[in-house]
Amino acid sequence: MKRRAFIKTSSLATTALAASATACTAATTASITSNPTTPPAFKLKYAPHFGMFKNTAGEDLIDQLNFMADQGFTAMEDNGMKNRAVAMQEKIAQTMAKRGMDMGVFVAHKIYWNQPNLASGEPDFREEFLTQIKESVEVAKRVNAKWMTVVPGLIDFRQDMGYQTNNVIETLKMASDLLTPHNITMVLEPLNFRDHPGLFLTKAAQGYQICEAVDSPACKILFDIYHQQIQEGNLIPNIEKSWDQIAYFQIGDNPGRKEPTTGEINYKNVFKYIHSRGFNDILGMEHGNFYKGADGEEKLIAAYRESDSFVVE
């Protein structure tokens, strides 16, 4: 081959190779653009808790938070937030703000599982509770929380239920006065008779009656779907009846208190109803993992994707 012909042929080959590479790059870019790695948003604001994804994300709480956000979760709840060091509370709050996540509930006070406190009407128990509510206001402000969980404690078997109810209402009115200036809401959680026998607050209707009597935006119901399935069932009608006083939901299937799809509750229908009412606040994932390890955590996320796949009408 003559030198001039060789140069011409080599030049054409180089041009073709460059064009092919450009086309390949464009195709790869298009593929990445059309297949984003960010998961689609959930229709509702489900809130995991620390430890739920530790096998995948590791023990570090901030790594767990970032993992939650990476999976499309836009909220997190932490029952034990009040007991964490202030520096950690601040770090958690900063990370959540950066990732666009909302803070769910934390437990506001010492819960009396074996002794009547708020139902008793005893001044010492009332003062202790109100002091702990004041402390929790500072925690809520630090972590940007709008809700805190309240459990009124054990029933007082030596008093008529009417007197006990009045004792609880009067204490909650005082607590509401402490919370209202800060736009913070305590959410009363009715618990089931099987897991927590003998507690004062057990049913949604009872919570509704108390919240109506307290008559404050600072006192609402935490409707735990797991507890209410055991206590009385009839979930959607009871949610509908008490809707005006519900500020927060928690999730857990029954039996087992694990993720949706692992028990008897039709969570897809329950979530669809809650969404249909325009609920924009948090549903806390207050349950364990049905399957173990990292694979189990992947299955848990898949269960929420499935339960969240209801059709919006």
Image (cartoon, rainbow, N blue to C red):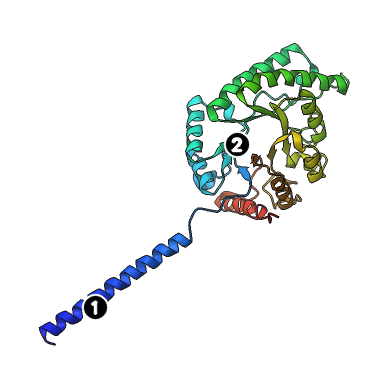
Is 298 on the left-hand or right-hand side of 122? left
Residue 183: percent from the left, percent from the top? 62, 26
Relative horizontal placement of residue 313, taking residue 305 as reference (left or right): right
- Residue shown at the point (72%, 12%) measured from the top left: 124
Local packing at callout 2 (Cα closer than 10 Å; few below 14, some 14-19, many 20+) is many
Quadrant in which the C terminus is drawn: bottom right
Q: Is residue 116 visible?
A: no
Q: Amino acid at mark 1?
A: Ala
At which x and y percent is residue 192?
A: 78, 36
Looking at this view, is 95 or 151 the one in front? 95
Q: Residue furthest left?
A: 3
Q: Where does label 1 land, which residue?
A: 13
Image quarter in which the N terminus is found: bottom left
The residue shown at (68%, 26%) is: 218
**Nearer the viewer's eye, disc 1 or disc 2?**
1
Q: Which residue is mark 2?
A: 77
Considering depth in this image, is 258 or 213 the residue closer to the camera?
Answer: 213
Name the image quarter holding residue 283.
Answer: top right
In the picture as drawn, the residue positioned furthest to the top comes out as: 123
* x 82%, y 20%: residue: 166
Q: Amino acid at mark 2?
A: Glu
Q: Quadrant of residue 227?
A: top right
Q: Nearer the viewer, residue 275 or 297?
A: 275
Cβ–Cβ below 8 Å for labels 1 and 2? no
SS under mark 1? helix
Q: Is residue 176 left or right of residue 66?
A: right
Q: Quadrant of residue 186?
A: top right
In the displayed structure, 7 sits above or below 34; it is: below
Query: Residue 305, image x and y in percent?
Result: 62, 53
Residue 195 is tagged as none
Per the image, label 2 sits on a secondary structure element best described as loop
Q: Residues within 10 Å of mark 1 (few under 14, many from 20)?
A: few
